[in-house]
Image (cartoon, rainbow, N blue to C red):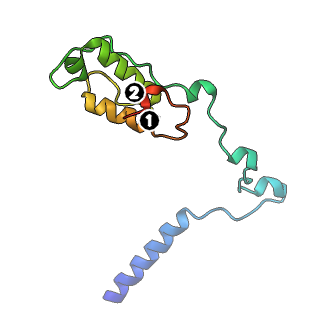
Amino acid sequence: MRIIGWISTMAAVCALAACDAPNTATSDAEPPEAQSSVAEPATPSEAEPAPPSEEYANSRPALDNGAAEPTEGSCLAELGREKAETLSEQCYEMSPATRPACNIQNSCDTIRAELKRGCNFGETSDNPDYCEGL
């Protein structure tokens, strides 16, 4: 009885496997080029992505502190709007991040840490004066 069950299971598996088998029969009417379903490999110029456009490369959103409110722990509450915005703008100018933590609603320590990171990033010989002493 077990042998019959095993044989019928294997027959069902073989029948189902044949359902999705590719059609290997070829017609004499088709030229050999049309029979090939293999895609041609990409040429090196197609395989390598193009560098981003100048507009895309500089598409970081603008720093907007206009709607910021002085909440507890924020740099705006700690330093006042003028000094906090100056620090925030310096941070934004130097940060290599796409969305840097330079908003004046962050703590001054967070903004200074991002400013320091930006000032130490890459070639530092042309850094502005405010990078010294961070």
Where is residue 13? Give x, y as percent. 45, 72
Q: Quadrant of residue 35?
A: bottom right
Q: Does residue 104 lie above or below 66 as drawn?
A: below
Q: CA distance from mark 2 to mark 1?
A: 7 Å
Amino acid on which disc 1 is placed: Gly
Q: Which residue is mark 1?
A: 118
Look at the image and tell me in which quarter the N terminus lies. bottom left
* Contact, mark 2 vs mark 1 (Cβ under 8 Å): yes
| Front in this rendered view, residue 66 or 46 | 66
Side (left or right) of 56 relative to 4: right
Q: Residue at x 74, y 49 (%)?
A: 44
Where is residue 4? Give x, y as percent. 36, 85
Side (left or right) of 43 relative to 14: right
Q: Residue at x 29, y 21 (%)?
A: 104
Q: Quadrant of residue 7?
A: bottom left
Q: Does residue 63 lie above or below 20 as drawn?
A: above
| Front in this rendered view, residue 71 or 57 | 71
Disc number placed over residue 91 in the picture, else none: 2
Q: For numbered disc 1, what is the local secondary structure?
A: helix
Amino acid on which disc 2 is placed: Cys
Instruction: Rate crowding at label 2 as few (under 14), some (14 to 19) or many (20 or more) other CA atoms within 10 Å.
Output: many
